[in-house]
Amino acid sequence: MAIHRNCEGLRRRDCLSLGLGALLGGGFVSALQSRAGAGEPGADKRPTGCILVWLDGGPSHIEMFDPKPQAPAEIRGEFQPIETKVPGVFFSENMQRLAAINDKFTIVRSVCHNQNNHGAGNHYMMTGAPTRIPVSCGAFVSFHPSMGSVVSAERGAPHNLPPYFAIPSITRSGGPNFLGNRHAPFVVADDPNSKGFRVRDVTLPTELDDGRAISRRLARKKLDQLQRYQDRATGDPVVGSDENFQQAVSLMTSDVALKAFEIDRESDAVRERYGRNALGQRLLLARRLVEAGVPFVTINDGGWDHHSNIFPAFKKQGATLESTVATLIEDLDERGMLDTTLVLVMGEFGRTPQISTLPGSTTPGRDHWSSAMSVLVAGCGTPRGQVVGATDTRGYAAIEKIYAPENLVSSVYLKLGINPDKIVYNSSGRPSHLVSDSRPIQELM
């Protein structure tokens, strides 16, 4: 699995050193905790789900959905604008597949905030809450539950499935905070495009999979040998408990759950359509999980911190992203799932309109810029073919229909049947609104 660094050099081992190994390792204990205390969705819940494609590092709005062809060369960059299927709307030439189906989704060009580093920006966009104190750019921070954890707590999932997945890793602020580790994501770290792909800790040991009647003692012994139980070292109290033992057996023997992970059930044509690469197959797996009843899946796609080499990187990385996202939206639409599946594509901020070159570098890039960004929103009742808001002629600031992360997160919750104004209580019993400003982006509703 490729490890992407942002400008602060954050890597998986950095998070482990912060004591977050249990979350990042995924594993079965987190999944069991996710199920504990998260009830089955009731009959009054809408059968909706969300696939969040998180572009870690902050993608350039100018190189994607908000080109500035009339701006000077040092702002507009190397790429030309192209027409989309919606008259009068233009994307960057990198977004050809998405331009061709722009009548199926909305672009919001006017989300902005004042958290101009990775740690704070990630937290704000992922939770709808700004950080309480200044944090460093490389910080892995959590002052408020992430969207996925809130959905886990409020919605649960059927068929013994964890309600919240992160693929291939948890995002920097994608954790549960005061909701507790039972609402942390189940992490699928392995590459679904690899030969023999399997989801760790979900497949029964062969000794338990041949239909024999076995003793409870033998079952526990074999299950205890699974990799998830390396979490003993953390002192996790749920390991070995009867309740979670039973949940482990339930998930491992659930036909719906196991089938959701079996991506090789998809035809070769479908897999080729998504792209035989890690990102393509992860989005296909996300579709399968939502189809099975999982209400929230995050795809954590790294490498978007383009301080340098932005134009060559976008020619390759941008093409892979937009082709895969276009396929996901088309596939959901063809299956009748787009009406109940929300697709989000976003990062922690946009990039500076002014192109710059770092000391010692020979290739130009763009720096962090939280005053302007573009967010793709599709499905779950979102009107199609819209562009919401606008930035100025050079892409420096949102100037029309300006929205904050709170408004975007409130929109997500409402579409998933959750009241963003609900009051929840932290571990100390102090009340907190899920979102401090519960007003949604009206154009998305």
Image (tube, rainbow, N blue to C red):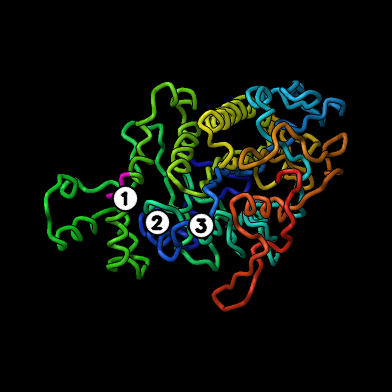
Is most of the magenta stretch helix, strand or loop?
helix
Kindly tell me whether residue 55 is visible in this rendering.
no
How many neighbours does mark 3 have within 10 angstroms: few (below 14), some (14-19), or many (20 or more)? many
**What's under tag 3, amino acid-wise?**
Arg
Residue 62 shown left or right of residue 412 in the figure: right
Residue designated by label 2: 31
Q: Which is more toward the observer, 313 or 264?
A: 264
Q: Is residue 64 above or below residue 54?
A: above
Contact (Cβ within 8 Å) of mark 1 with mark 2: yes
Q: Secondary structure at mark 1?
A: loop
Look at the picture and state if 359 lies above or below 171.
above
Residue 58 included in the magenta stretch of the image: no
Q: Which residue corresponds to mark 1?
A: 201
Residues in magenta, as a range: 251-255
Give the image location of residue 75, x and y in percent: 82, 31
Pick the quarter of the image with the N terminus. top left
Q: What residue is disc 3 on?
A: 155
Task: Say which label, 1 or 2, has the lower sequence index.
Answer: 2
